Image (cartoon, rainbow, N blue to C red):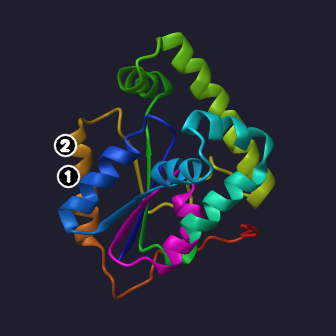
Amino acid sequence: MLITISGPPGSGKSTNAARLAAEFGFDHVSGGDTFREMAAERGLSPVEFNELAEDDEQIDRDLDRRLRETAVEGDELVLESRLAGWLAGDHADIRVWLDAPLDVRVDRIVDREQKTFAVAREETRRREESEAKRYRDYYNIDIHDRSIYDVVINTGRWGEDTVTDLLVAAVEAYDTDTDEGQTPVDGVDYDF
């Protein structure tokens, strides 16, 4: 089974992907961890590598290609990244989108990264705008289109344990013998 967890910064992707993987004994692959590995391969910090990626689209394409290959080969895997649901395409059994209101997500980022609220909010806003443009330009993906996801949860409404419980219940209820209701991922340009 391949489960993808996607969502914007501060939505709870990493927390819930790790919890879901632990619950079912699956492997967990994080797009953020893969990005950091790629930075280390070049001898750069994640911040330096991110700045380089702003001017070098091949960095995003290399990251996305690695994640796509992981998804295609994945079994008993939780794949977590902003584009995981899109990149996995029809290989995903369950595609999850987690979200929360911007201010809730920014509060989480402030706690995690020790930034001021104003700085974290502006960085998050700029990052999301930049990513949405790149996804559209690179792959013809509208990151705001939720139609491919099987489960969409506003994590700002419930605590961490409840969100995890909802995800566990969805996975346990999944019928592996049918593809009924599976939303195809059409129109994506997987030209990495």
Residue 163 place in picture, x, y as percent: 27, 46
- The magenta-colored residue range is 69-88
Q: Amino acid at mark 1?
A: Asp
Whether residue 14 is visible to the viewer of this picture, yes or no, is yes
Label drawn at residue 165: 1
Q: Residue at x 49, y 60 (%)?
A: 149
Q: Residue at x 78, y 56 (%)?
A: 138
Residue 43 relative to residue 24: left or right: right
Report how far apart the C-alphas of labels 2 and 1 lie in the structure. Answer: 6 Å
Q: How many marks?
A: 2
Residue 50 is inside the magenta segment:
no
Residue hosting label 2 = 161
Q: Front-most of 28 and 101? A: 28
Find residue 107 and report its image quarter.
top left
Q: Residue at x 49, y 48 (%)?
A: 32
Check the image and name the residue furthest to the front.
Answer: 43
Residue 95 place in picture, x, y as percent: 45, 63
Q: Secondary structure at mark 1?
A: helix
Q: Quadrant of the C terminus?
A: bottom right
Q: Are marks 2 and 1 in contact (CB under 8 Å)?
A: yes
In the displayed structure, 155 sits above or below 35; it is: above
Within 10 Å of disc 2 (Cα), the crowding (few <14, some 14-19, many 20+) is few
Q: Residue at x 37, y 46 (%)?
A: 14
Residue 79 is inside the magenta segment:
yes
Q: Front-most of 178 and 192? A: 192
